[in-house]
Amino acid sequence: MINPYLIHLLIFVGIYIILVVSLNLALGYTGLLNLGHVAFFGIGAYTSALLVKAGVPFITAFFSSGIVAGIFGYLLVLATKKLKGDYLALTTLGFSYVVYSVLINWGSLTRGPLGLPGIPKPELFGYVITSGEAYLLFAGFIALLVVLFIFFIIQSPFGRLLEATRDDELGLRVLGKNTFALKCKAMMISAFFAGIAGSVYAHYITYIDPGSFMLGEIILMLTIVIVGGIASLKGSVVATFLIILIPELLRFFHLPSSVLGPVRQMLYALILISIVLFRPRGLFGRIDLA
Amino acid sequence: MNQKHRPYIVLFMLSLLFLAGCGKPTGNQPTGNVVVEKEKPVVKIGASLSLTGGSAFMGEGMRNAMELAIHNLGPTKYKYELVFEDDAMNPKMAADASQKLITIDHVDAILSLSSGTGNVVSQFTQPNKVIHFGVASDPTVAEGEYNFIHWTPPEEETRALISELERRNLHNVAFISFNQQGEKAIMNDFSHRVEGTEISVVSTKIFNNGEKDFKTYLLQIEEERPDVIVVLAFSPEIEIIMKQIKELDIDTPVTSIEAVEFSEQPELFEGVWYIQAADPTDTFLADYVSTYGKQPAPGTANAYDEVNMIVAGFERAGKNPLKKPSTAEVVAELHKIKDFPGALGPLTVPESGIVLSHAVVRMVKDGKFVTIKP
């Protein structure tokens, strides 16, 4: 029997696989340097939590979380239509801050900084997923579906068009392709799955607050994408295991607290620096960071 | 070795290392920093605290107090061990920490710090029948029979503030507050309690994390001619607010709930009276200062009491010294606690699980925090 602590960590691995694989679709495969992914994660978490607390069935809330996040994804692409590279990164980061500000200040809906406690566990076809094992199956199944879905996308002609958008947008437009529509679709799919990940997260941890969807999370997601390799599904999955589980090892070393925090941060930094120095394309990446 | 396979081999080795770490501790293997005695059953008290990050001073204070409480225990039926985990006051990390404490360390009780992390820890302790004491202002942390709160609740602090405002004949109140859980709870309760009284809230300004210029808020507050400005903030914002009040020549008196003692520049608050969560007793203060050479942080004395109440619960519930009682039996004993001699004065655990303690009025005199109304 698997230890419940390991089950708990594997559930988080599943949630982050959904997040990172979907981020890689926009960032790696389409070339959209999107730092607003964490906002879609938050939008999904709050949508699902608020709907279920209002009495909406979980399955409806689950898909709504993805749809609402997807709509915001479309709006973000619309607003950043003429931006790319660093400018797009800064604007999408700004979007994350806007969403954070709305979540923290719209107290009547979100309870602001108090957060939303007591989010019910998911109920599917009359069965309430309460045990860790069942939740791991649920999160793992969703993660597997998302990975397969994105795998089929990138193998399809549409996926090749996304990669062409990343590599030579102008060339693609000369060939008569609507690159804006391609970016919209990629961002909406990416945001949809980030919203779904938010729902899985909120109903597992049962408490969310705006602080859970801020800069630290997007840095974590980007670290995983870079370590795994940009535009590599396999890399994203492997790197999620590494980045989520390695810091947990520190808990078994009984380090003094004055050392623990810096060591945790240094671990991420060391992994990133090592990747940049020795494997600039990440563990399994196909394109350079530049 | 084929270079292509290297990442898989590294991943495999790390997985093995991790699984080894997750293994059940065997026999008398030391856990935390205390060695297990064979004769007595061991009661493990875990803690999910902010030992890193901006709130580490509070987590460190609680950890010190827990160790002090264990050190000061007299003869007991059972052996008490402490296990600490860092959550950096982050809900996700608190979930990791509490899962590890419950399923790897098999703790009997967990202490947490803050409403955000407390709300997460309580979701894991309740189904696992692990006792949880939170230093938190949000009452939802105490939901469920295994969850408790030991922190002077916002309603007690606002009651003390209203009483002092009435005594000083100050009726028009303005708030400038950080947008945070505890502060929000205080303002909500205050607004609710002053309904129908002579006291009214004439202005409320809420700022978010990262704001540094409060002059616009302060000038807007001044236009409403309040009798007193209540500042609810942490360091460094609270110091910045006090400096900007002086720069703007605002002479309206300032007061606060708890915030003053979060400042490392008490000279900025000279002569300011304020409300503080229950006062630590002189005995605890002397003991703590002589052991650690510094003043306790907010929550420190609470952690000391929490450990002692948990120990009292186990000792009272335990009929057989060779077998520790179930946590359900301990919870029943905890609910019987009345006028328990704590570091924060006499403590009572009501049915709600929110330990009753009283707020005090304090003042900054010669750079020191002095209680003027216990």
Image: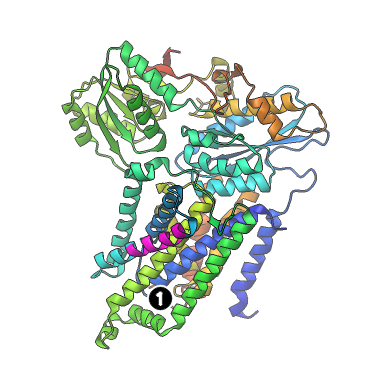
What colouring does the structure picture have?
rainbow
Residue A169 pos. (x, y %): 29, 80
In which chain is the residue bearing label 1?
A
Above/below status of A284 relative to B234: below
- Magenta region: which residues? A60-71
**Residue furthest front as drawn:** A126
Is residue B71 visible in the rendered image? The answer is no
Residue type marked 1:
Tyr
Q: Is residue B36 left or right of residue A280?
A: right
Position of A24 relative to B335 (above/below): below
Closer-to-camera residue (B65/A213): A213
The residue under label 1 is A29
Q: Quadrant of residue A80?
A: bottom left
Question: Can residue B106 be seen?
Answer: yes
Residue drawn 22% across and 34% down? B217
Q: Position of residue B220 (x, y in %)?
A: 18, 32
Dividing the picture into quarters, in which one does residue B225 lie?
A: top left
Q: Nearer the viewer, residue A280 or B93?
A: B93
- Crowding at dot 1, Cα within 10 Å, few <14 / some 14-19 / many 20+, comes out as many
Residue B72 vertical position relative to residue A123 in the rendered view, above or below: above
Relative horizontal placement of residue A60, taking residue B33 as reference (left or right): left
**What predominant SS class does the magenta segment belong to?**
helix
